[in-house]
Amino acid sequence: MHTQGIRQEAFGELVTAIAAEEGVPARVTARGELDIASSAAFGIELARLIGERGPDVVVDVSGLTFCDARGLAALVAADELARRHGGAVTLTGPRPQMAKILRLTGLDRRFAPARTPVR
């Protein structure tokens, strides 16, 4: 895979790596805690990414060790922005605890996991 850009950002206890390749959705890998301390900066970063790279974004959440209501709100806000521009935010790799939170809140229907690997 030829990657045009990879950028890593740290937001408190959350570290993200952003990979963008021409012709495929931007991919964000989140590791650590997506919570009240990191959610605002994370949401701003997703909004910037949607504006610069297009409305389809894949967020790999397999490295999240914690996600609170503010973290979920940041993901929902990014998805709403993406949908207004004709795309969507897709979550991949949720750990069992994150999958349970998504299911209990009904967000599992909004963030249906990708069925095939994203390049």
Image (cartoon, grey):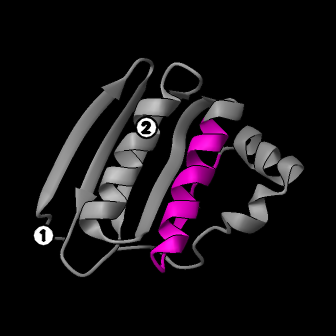
Classify mark 2: helix, strand or loop. Answer: helix
The numbered dot on residue 2 is: 1
Residue 67 in magenta?
no
Does 106 sit left or right of 9 as displayed?
right
For the point 58% across and 62% down, the residue is 80
Position of residue 56 measured from the top left corner of the image (x, y, whole percent): 42, 71
**Is residue 52 in view?**
yes
Does 72 sit left or right of 10 as displayed?
right
**What amino acid type is highlighted by mark number 2?**
Phe
The numbered dot on residue 42 is: 2
Position of residue 103 measured from the top left corner of the image (x, y, whole percent): 84, 53
Which quarter of the image is occupied by the C terminus? bottom left
Does 75 sit left or right of 17 as displayed?
right
The numbered dot on residue 92 is: none
Magenta part of the chain: 71-94
Residue 75 in magenta?
yes
**Image height of 44 relative to 1, above or below:** above
For the point 57% across and 73% down, the residue is 114
